Image: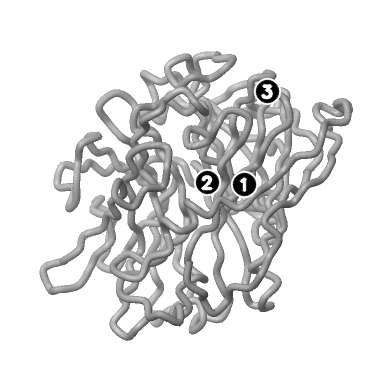
Amino acid sequence: MRYHCIHRSIPSVLAFSATLASGGHCVAQSPPFRVVRDAGWIQLLDRDHGWNAADGCISIPLNGIEAPGLDPHPRTLFTFGDSIIGDVGPDGRRLPGNEFINNSMLYVDGLEPDPAKSDFIYVRDNGNGHPRSAFIPTTPDAQPGDYFWLMDGIALGDWVHIFGIHLRPPPGGGWPSNQGITMITIPKDSRPPFEDQVQQKVPLYAPPNGDIGPYQFPACIMSNTKAAGAPHPDGYIYIYGAREDPFVKKAIVARVLPEQFADISAWRYWDGSAWVEGITNSAPMTGRISGVYSVTPMPSGKYIMVFQKDTIAPEVAIRIGDSPTGPWGSMIEIYHCPETDQDPDIYAYNASAHPHLSKPGELLISYSVNSWDFEDAFWIADLGRPRFIRLKLAGN
């Protein structure tokens, strides 16, 4: 792998011991976890031509099997947020002519990150010689210039449901305003420009109210079903979100039966003791999470939440829960993102797991890297590329 201008020598393995706290009681001291960087997946996204960077990095198994090791030949759809298209020079800096789009996707065949079995998806020519995002808002409330930040999705039967945050840039520039959540439904064999897509506005966003921040789904989706390979299935799909209170994101959750998934009115939200109607009745389960995170069932009957500590802190962290709703144990930092040590403007975010691409006894985890310095973020190719690590779990 060639040298990029922000690379430096870093340890490839972190080892440490931890005592897991779950439900207010201590679990016995476990052998050390090990976390290793996954060079293969990092290199798959280290590209010099065409798609060369994006953040977000959420994976959807198109056969619906989410458990590690159950499908030796999965087909995966990755969704990405902000993406850059163009050429990168040998020094790791983008050449003039790179273009920015708001979302893109990636199809990967198999468990291994093989470039020959990978296809980066966006609209390569928008009729004017320029690339375009994989999806743009077309619901009746959409305006020219609106765009999607793609979130998690799920494959059910012959259909894939992908959720997008509908964003609108203000006149003259600045932070975009949230126009709500759209569910984008496509056939599993659909390809760009996705003329067979169906977009539906769904009530999965509630604006802030005083000291209570906005509620938003989905940060991640966990299918706790026999069909998905869950080790202790209860038959429900769990949809996790975030209540973004000032200075802290808090985890919230909804659930629904698979056959009712596309009917958002059938979703029920955990209020701390029961499943009820209404997104704003969601009770925070735990805090200090990231906007994108993941929850994965474990063979022991526990659940592991993977997230970026405090949204943009340099550490990837986990919590262990007794059930899909918790209670969730103490935060355990599992990995320090070394890219953040190289410049005070560089930050890491949106850590989440990819269980169906993992081996039994471990979790493949990605996190995104970016810079508060826009010039660096655009021109230095490495700053826009997700990184991958593997958390090797001891026993259960």
| Residue in the image at 31% along x and 46% along y | 107
User: What quarter of the picture does the C terminus occupy?
Assistant: top right
Tag 2–tag 1 contact (CB < 8 Å): yes
Location of residue 305 with respect to 176 vertically, above or below: above
Q: Residues within 10 Å of mark 1 (few under 14, many from 20)?
A: many
| Residue in the image at 64% along x and 25% along y | 298
Q: Which residue is mark 3?
A: 323
The answer to whether any part of residue 309 appears in the image is no
Secondary structure type for disc 1: strand
Decide if residue 138 is on the left or right side of residue 333. Answer: left
The answer to whether any part of residue 384 appears in the image is yes
Q: Which residue is mark 2?
A: 216
Residue situated furthest left in the rendering: 127
Q: Foreground: 381 or 22?
A: 381
Q: Which residue is mark 1?
A: 243
N-term mark: 3 or 2: 2
Decide if residue 58 is on the left or right side of residue 241. Answer: left
Tag 1–tag 3 contact (CB < 8 Å): no
Q: Foreground: 367 or 3?
A: 3
Secondary structure type for disc 2: strand
Spatial separation of the CA atoms under disc 1 and disc 3:
20 Å
Residue situated furthest front in the rendering: 1
Amino acid marked by disc 1: Arg
Q: Residues within 10 Å of mark 3 (few under 14, many from 20)?
A: some
N-term mark: 2 or 1: 2
Q: Which is more foreground, mark 3 or mark 2?
A: 3
N-term mark: 1 or 3: 1
| Residue in the image at 52% along x and 46% along y | 216
| Residue in the image at 54% along x and 36% along y | 279
Amino acid marked by disc 3: Ser
Question: x, y (%) of residue 340?
Answer: 67, 69
Secondary structure type for disc 3: loop
